[in-house]
Amino acid sequence: MHELFEHPEIVSPYGSGEERFKDKAFVQDLSLESFLKAVPFHASNEKESRAYAKKVLVDIGSDIRTAKYRQAVFDDLVPKVLLRNNVRKYVRNLNDLAYKLDAFQKKRDLPKGLAMARLYRDILDNPHDLESANSDAVKTVASYFRELRVSNSSSHLRSLLERIGNSAEMAFRVSLDRNGSPLKMHALELVQKDAGEKRGLLSLLEKTLRKKRHEHNLRTTGGLNELGKIIRDYMERQFVPVINAYTPQIQEMIRLLEPLDFYVGFAEYFGALKERNFEICKPTLLPAEERRMFVKNARNPLLLKNRAMEVKNKGISPFQADTENNAGRIVPNGIEYNADENMFVITGPNNGGKTTYAKTIGLIQLLGQKGLFVHAESAEVSFVDGIYTHFVTPDDIAQGEGRYRNELRRMKEIFEKATPYSLVILDEPCGGTRYEEGLRQSLAILDGFHKLGSATYFTTHMHPLTKEVDKGRYPAARNLTVEWKYVDHRMLYTYKMIPGASDKSYGEEIAREMGLMPENIEETLFQKAEEGGYGEILRKRFS
């Protein structure tokens, strides 16, 4: 048995275990799947790399030590393009090796085994330069490949491949029966070739078949002839088990594929954004006990068009075209809370950016806590013990019990799980019932979270809630609103979040802008009726 060199753990090196986040609703509410689709993973099975990245963000635990360990890798790979490219080469090498291993396991023949073994040898014997790395993770990977390269197992494999590949040093001896036909497999053996003998397998055929009228070849139009099958079976019987003995080590090395792709994919993503002047930073990580977040000029990456797949295939940086056009137009906003001021009631017109702002907060918390860079100029992020979200989805309506009951069930779940060290993001809750009932329930929910002390963001169109904040009903609460301007009878959104409360939802202004006021509707109906030949029917209705 060969000594097995286990792959190094480079994502969770300190054994953080499972994530404490038992509530996973934020995966859907923060559009995490859409965000991950923008990251250009390089393994041929991007679906698996994306699933691994999701596992890191959602299921694998993280503490400050682990997060800083991961941050150091991005400090290495984001600015150092050459180093990043060399790590990416290892990703592609391991990807190719995984493909060849899979082919060999499906059909354990000698050609597939040799292809796999030779690639494994070549990866070890042609290392990519990782010497400029400062992070422990990349240094550990370099050391691992170096250790494998000088191991006895690798030396034995090189000797085996050299022996198989050097036809000048081997020949076949075939025992023949009295009729001149080759005997079966057990009669074939490998011997040293005489120095003066002709090179290659043809000399064997010439000697054994010299006096018979047969093709000097191992194949016929129907495949291998009898001698060819004997030689093939002998070679596979001799060498396939030997090559197969290396598969556990090859499998172990391939386990680095997804962790390396995780780092390279995100590093390329962050690097491409920086190239397009989309601000990215390494957040300062704070213990949960500080209960605060301070972020300068945060932007939501979900507003960028997703072209990662397309541009990767063209060999250019992700977002190269789109971010050049729209990255600068994504309006930045600040995020700030502390233990004494950590509840925010957010109002403003539809499509003004309330939901986008709320999702930005959740994404920055998640990415920062998991050791990734965040989409901001600068950031300080306290760890939280859970991210609890509720965004209205079609499922709230389709489950049969009604949206309001589903909303209340969700609120109850959050109250049962959240602590003062949690982040809670609620997007327009209690809207599934009469306005008065929803308002009363919203006040009760705000009362509860204020007493609990969780950092809470609550978007709503129920403007009386803002008056309760202004009156001081919730000392830790503040009002935020979406800024907008009214220009030429049209609403102009600035998408800036500013202190204060909106006095209304501006639904009428939006309807006027969309051409859905009563007079607009009548005009549209009559025009359509005249064109369709049923104007008389409408005139009776309007008379």
Image: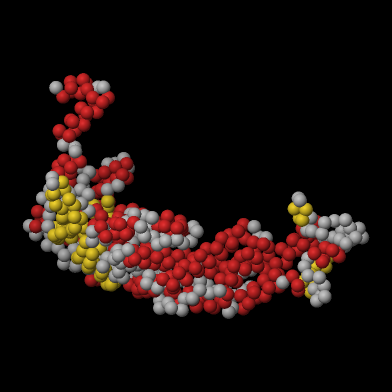
- Relative placement, left or right, of 89 versus 112 is left
Quick one: quadrant of the C terminus?
A: top left
Tag count:
0
- Vertical placement of residue 409 versus 451, above or below: above
Using the rendered image of the protein, determine whether residue 417 is visible from the camera's viewpoint.
no
Above/below status of 316 relative to 1: above
Instruction: Looking at this view, name the residue that lies furthest to the left.
Output: 471
Where on the picture, by quarter, is residue 54? bottom left
- Left or right of residue 490: residue 265: right
Image quarter of the N terminus = bottom right
Residue 180 x/y as whole percent = 89, 59
Task: Please name the residue shown 20% across and 23% down the image.
Answer: 538
Q: Which of 258 and 125 is in front in this view?
A: 125
Which residue is located at x 70 percent, y 67 percent? 239
Residue drawn at the location 20% of the way across and 41% of the way down: 514
The image quadrant of residue 316 is bottom left
Q: Where is residue 301 in the image (x, y as percent from the top left)?
A: 31, 59
- Give percent across and percent down for residue 336: 20, 65
Observer able to see residue 146: yes
**Picture quadrant where residue 396 is located:** top left
From this view, report whether residue 452 is shown above or below residue 462.
Answer: below
